[in-house]
């Protein structure tokens, strides 16, 4: 059945380069189940138009797609691309991809002509080795194996096409669930939620919803110390909209919930942890040319109190205490504005330069960290001396990469392990700092010219509680990595890649923004299509 699912997904992917008929009915959106915890809506017609994949310039790309397909595959899809209405699907309405705790994949599309869709699916079935049957039941058409019990299945009605793929741990009957959902039988549906209404409130090329309950499952599955979600925040959803424009892609995200108390609690929590907007106080120390920049404002005391009361963080806090570190004192590491930059990175030789600045009133936490490192070093030295005398039971493993610690001034230290980059950390003039590698130390507390205030994305570094940016322009045109990439890529492709300027993201708790900026006025989708065409056609 997995093979059949791939056929249906492939059909949607190929048809995504075509526009279809319009229908005013929104019934198909009511099919999405209420327990969906991740939803993506893709406006195919808008993406196709902006990518210009149907232009004469990309005719060669389309020919390559079909020339590399088997002859019978081309016979099925090429006529559909030329006349999308023959598919029976309406790509002027969004295609939805969703997940639930029981289904790892759900694909939902609007049906414009049930008869044409039936004929089209019959052709797709003939392409595969297995030959599932079409069964009419309760007003829908199911595509099923004779054996039944499959993990994946497809069904459609006059309004909707739905594909479901069950998780390995679920015992739900796929056919029964298809019938229940498409026939809009018992149960609540996601379209009634505030998050879905927010998703539909803006025109977007791509929109998505992420439930915080899904993050909680991920944290459980991977034992990741993520944001403490059990504190009444699992009812929160993040709604994101992405639009491709001339010269950039713009994204917006907003937090919403059916539970107004949970939403209010989240907003209050965010404001307590990050109570002020940044002024970019460290901008003079941050170079314009860097790989990655981040800044924000953190109330370390509030953050420490919040995580201290979270059971899933107890083991981590206890581990810190065993190392001689007081979690309450460590909160002073972050007590105001924070800035971080990666100013140098060279894979060959493992050279890297990073700097972190953080406003802090006292050096207590920094000195505690140095003391803990020194205690660890002394402990290892003692064990080795005992081992040399034969006073240690069992086998003592010797590590050639010993840790060393140097005091380089009042509240200023350098730690190093073997061939790893040096770590310079300390407290100076009300600022806690960490510099990685000599490349990081070289810019530590030194005014930069030009500085990050001259960067193309500089405006986001002020007026937000958090902001970050990846400088593609520097990576591709000014760094050693760019030179390495350019040496392996065809010149035309590399010239296209070099038009990526930066990717930025900023937020204020309730809402946030994202931007992928180009150095040209091209639409990013067209740029991506151009790169694919150059790769596929070996265009010189």
Image (cartoon, helix red, strand yellow):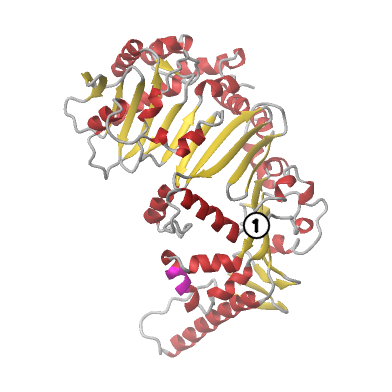
| Residue closer to the observer: 87 or 394 | 87
Q: Is residue 403 visible?
A: no
Q: In which quarter of the image is the C terminus?
A: top right
Using the image, determine if residue 304 lies above or below residue 219: below
Q: What stretch is highlighted in magenta?
A: 314-319
For this orientation, the residue located farthest to the front is: 261
Q: Which residue is drawn at 47% across and 45% down?
A: 257
- Quadrant where the N terminus sits is top left
Q: Residue at label 1?
A: 352
Residue drawn at (64%, 39%) of the image: 515
| In this view, 158 is above or below 418 | above
- The residue that appears at 36% across and 13% down in the rendered structure is 72
Q: Pinpoint residue 45: horizontal percent, then vertical percent.
A: 52, 20
Q: Can residue 311 be seen in this view?
A: yes
Please identify the quarter of the rendering in which residue 302 is found: bottom right
Q: Where is residue 82 in the image (x, y as percent from the top left)?
A: 48, 9
Q: Which of 250 and 192 is in front in this view?
A: 192
Answer with left or right where residue 148 lies relative to residue 453: left
- Residue at the right extreme, as displayed: 449
* Relative side of 133 to 261, left or right: left
In percent of width and height, residue 15 lies at 45, 19
List x then y, in percent, for residue 168. Answer: 27, 42
| Mark 1 secondary-structure assignment | strand
Q: Which residue lies furthest to the left in this view?
A: 147
Most common SS among magenta residues: helix
How many numbered discs, if any? 1
Above/below status of 429 relative to 220: below
Residue 374 is a magenta residue: no
**Residue 258 located left or right of residue 165:** right
Query: Which residue is at the front of the view, 341 or 217?
Result: 217
Label 1 crowding class (10 Å Cα cut-off): few <14, some 14-19, many 20+? some
């Amino acid at each position: 059945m997995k093979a059949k699912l791939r056929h249906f997904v492939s059909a949607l992917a190929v048809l995504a380069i075509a526009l279809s008929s319009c229908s005013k009915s929104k019934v198909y959106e009511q099919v999405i189940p209420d327990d969906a915890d991740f939803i993506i809506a893709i406006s195919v017609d808008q993406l196709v138009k902006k990518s210009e994949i149907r232009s004469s310039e990309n005719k060669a790309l389309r020919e390559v797609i079909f020339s590399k397909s088997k002859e019978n595959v081309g016979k099925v899809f090429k006529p559909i691309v030329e006349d999308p209405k023959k598919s029976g699907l309406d790509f002027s309405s969004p295609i939805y991809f969703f997940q639930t705790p029981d289904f790892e994949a759900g694909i939902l599309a609007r049906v414009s002509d049930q008869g044409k869709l039936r004929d089209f699916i019959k052709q797709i079935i003939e392409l595969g080795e297995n030959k599932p049957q079409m069964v009419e039941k309760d007003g829908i058409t199911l595509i099923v194996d004779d054996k039944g019990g499959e993990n994946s299945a497809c069904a459609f009605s006059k309004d909707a096409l739905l594909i479901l793929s069950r998780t390995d741990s679920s015992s739900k009957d796929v056919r029964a669930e298809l019938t229940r959902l498409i026939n809009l039988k018992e149960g609540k549906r996601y379209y009634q939620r505030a998050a879905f209404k927010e998703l539909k409130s803006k025109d977007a090329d791509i929109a998505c919803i992420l439930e915080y309950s899904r993050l909680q499952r991920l944290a459980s599955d991977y034992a990741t110390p993520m944001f403490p979600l059990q504190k009444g925040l699992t009812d929160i959803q993040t709604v994101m909209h992405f639009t491709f424009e001339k010269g950039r892609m713009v994204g917006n995200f907003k937090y919403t919930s059916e539970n107004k108390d949970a939403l209010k609690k989240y907003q209050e929590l965010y404001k307590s942890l990050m109570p002020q907007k940044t002024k970019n106080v460290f901008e003079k120390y941050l170079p314009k040319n860097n790989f990655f920049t981040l800044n924000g404002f953190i109330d370390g005391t509030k953050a420490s109190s919040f995580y201290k009361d979270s059971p899933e963080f107890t083991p981590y806090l206890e581990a810190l205490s065993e190392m001689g570190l007081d979690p309450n004192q460590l909160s002073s590491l972050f007590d105001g504005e924070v800035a971080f930059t990666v100013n140098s990175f060279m894979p060959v030789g493992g050279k890297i330069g990073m700097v972190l600045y953080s406003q802090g009133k006292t050096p207590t936490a920094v000195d505690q960290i140095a003391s803990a490192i020194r205690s660890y070093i002394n402990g290892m030295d003692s064990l080795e001396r005992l081992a040399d005398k034969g006073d240690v039971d069992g086998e003592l493993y010797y590590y050639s990469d010993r840790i060393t610690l140097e005091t380089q001034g009042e509240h200023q230290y350098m730690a190093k392990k073997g061939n790893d980059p040096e770590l310079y950390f300390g407290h100076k003039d009300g600022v806690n700092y960490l510099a990685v590698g000599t490349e990081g130390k070289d810019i530590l507390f030194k005014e930069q010219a030009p500085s990050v205030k001259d960067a193309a994305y500089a405006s986001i570094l002020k007026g937000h509680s958090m902001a970050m940016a990846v400088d593609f322009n520097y990576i591709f045109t000014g760094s050693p990595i760019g030179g390495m990439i350019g040496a392996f890529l065809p010149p035309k492709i590399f010239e296209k890649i070099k038009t990526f300027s930066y990717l930025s993201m900023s937020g204020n708790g309730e809402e946030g923004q994202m931007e992928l900026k180009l150095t040209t006025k091209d639409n990013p989708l067209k740029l991506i299509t151009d790169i694919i065409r150059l790769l596929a056609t070996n265009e010189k």
